[in-house]
Image (cartoon, coloured by chain):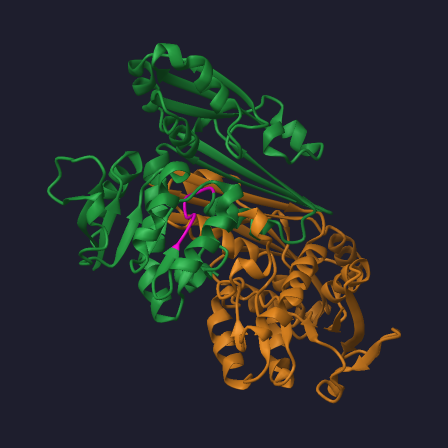
Chain colours: A orange, B green
Amino acid sequence: MLKIAIVGYGNLGKSLEKETQKNTETELVAVYSRREINHPRYRPMKEIGKKQDFDVAMLALGSYSDIESYANAFENIDTVDSFDTHAKIAEYKAYLNSVKKESLAIISTGWDPGLLSLARAVFGIGATEYATLWGEGVSQGHSNAIRAIPGVLDAVQFTVPKADALTRVSKGVTDGKLLHDRICYVACVENDKKEIEKQILSMPNYFEGYTTVVHFVSQQEVRELKRRTHHRGQVICTGEGFEANCTVTLDNNPDYTAKIMLAYAHALPQLKADGYRGAVDVFDIPMKYLASATML
Amino acid sequence: MLKIAIVGYGNLGKSLEKETQKNTETELVAVYSRREINHPRYRPMKEIGKKQDFDVAMLALGSYSDIESYANAFENIDTVDSFDTHAKIAEYKAYLNSVKKESLAIISTGWDPGLLSLARAVFGIGATEYATLWGEGVSQGHSNAIRAIPGVLDAVQFTVPKADALTRVSKGVTDGKLLHDRICYVACVENDKKEIEKQILSMPNYFEGYTTVVHFVSQQEVRELKRRTHHRGQVICTGEGFEANCTVTLDNNPDYTAKIMLAYAHALPQLKADGYRGAVDVFDIPMKYLASATML
């Protein structure tokens, strides 16, 4: 029985709870949240570290704004997260490696970064080029990044491959900025619009360099758009004489992310027993911890 | 500069040589063969172990008949192979682990087992079912297995997905025996036909349980069919609310296998430096040894 705590009770936190309840080998011990929530396992965020009656904390926070600022609170607690700012993974990992000595942090374990990273690595073997297409679907990371901007009441961001994205890939274009559009729906206080749009368009790693469109809509409209939980990812690797194409389609982005995070959480006790410490990402963990040898 | 020896000079051995010549970080030191071949780097097979002026031996032997019988000759030599009898990998690995103490054997590194094994493991996370389709294409392992039967002069085996294979997969069929036909073209001595067909159809792990068709043809016809080097593999993983589909298409099966084996060979020095010993398969090796962190 793996005892888990969920940290953060947004979409991903709720999906983690749902997946935990389905899984008979997992027990939910605590739900930490900044907001006071009506939940039998609720504990205030500031109490993190006071009581450690669980095996692993699942960090269901928004990467951009939250995970980094809370990471030090988990100095002595094993964690699994889905930190998804590709460009900052190395920095985040180095930071966690400096604070975590006896505990283990499994980072960036969603479907991308995560499973599609592994697909790029696997089918990148012998390849000369690789590209990734995301969408059409809501990016939780990008939506969270917009919501962290002061004045934003709510927001959702759709990542949409350009209509000719596959043709571009076949011509050797691999830069995601040239393969996708980012369509943002933002509810905000009326007089903040201009400043918010400017902050979105210039946000490094998230929107800078992309074709980004910002639509200002009502909170009700954002709420309705958020119900579209489907997503899609595609990795294309090409080399001399071969092409590999991996596509994953999902009905519910946070549910799928939660399933993946929980799979890594279940690998954690064995990883600890085998001496793993500090911060590890999906490239550090051999697949034997997640797959049966019969899959060879 | 990685110094390599190629062991076996059939299709795979020749592809390894070709890929080695393209790669400026690899030097071909020796080609071991049972047959006396006209090659500047030729050494007789029986001299294996006498001289170790290379870093890694690439085993380009037929899995079924050869690799196991030669494995003990490599007690003190690091090896990379593409052992492809799925059902016997565990046994082969255990055997190598018993003979190799200070050396490292990276086993079963082709595209399947190998890259598609990793695809099954990666997209098997959270999945309830997975299936693999191979072909249409020549299976080197199955062709070698037929060629090892006494009386067979030459042979080639095409693996062909059944016309309704994808429909069967969508209905939950995952057993490869129910998804593929195995079409064999065999040249042999006239009076051995009946016995050879019987041996093929009943060969465990390779043909037993499959819909297998054996065509007896001339050696010339087998030679011409062997020129069809293309192949295809597809892994389909499904779970609640998601489906992953990985397809790899290749123009030249031995060339692609050689590229993959060489990628693992290049990882070998670092794996040794990090303490890896004995027999390891693709599930034992973290992708960080083969991929750049920028792929995360």
Q: Is residue A181 above or below residue B39?
A: below
A241 versus B76 height, above or below: above
Q: Nearer the viewer, residue A3 or A84?
A: A3
Q: Quadrant of residue A31?
A: bottom right
Q: Residue furthest left?
A: B40
- At 35% from the left and 60% from the top, the residue drawn is B267
Rendering coords of residue B182 (x, y %): 50, 24
Residue A96 on image: x %, y %: 54, 80
Q: Residue at x 38, y 10 (%)?
A: B191
Left-right relation of A163 to A260: left
**Magenta stretch in the rendered image:** B106-112
Q: Is residue B290 visible?
A: no
Q: Is residue A156 left or right of residue B263?
A: right
Residue projecting furthest to the top: B190
Q: From this view, report whether residue A203 is shown above or below residue B72.
A: below
Give the tally of numbered discs: 0
Q: Is residue B104 visible?
A: yes
Percent x, y of residue A227: 77, 53
> Does residue A120 show up magenta in the picture?
no
A142 with respect to A218 (left or right): left
Quadrant where the N terminus of chain B sits is bottom left
- Judge by depth and name the residue closer to the eye, B51 or B255: B51
Rendering quarter of residue B288: bottom left
Q: Main secondary structure of the magenta part?
A: loop
Q: Position of residue B162 (x, y in %)?
A: 58, 23
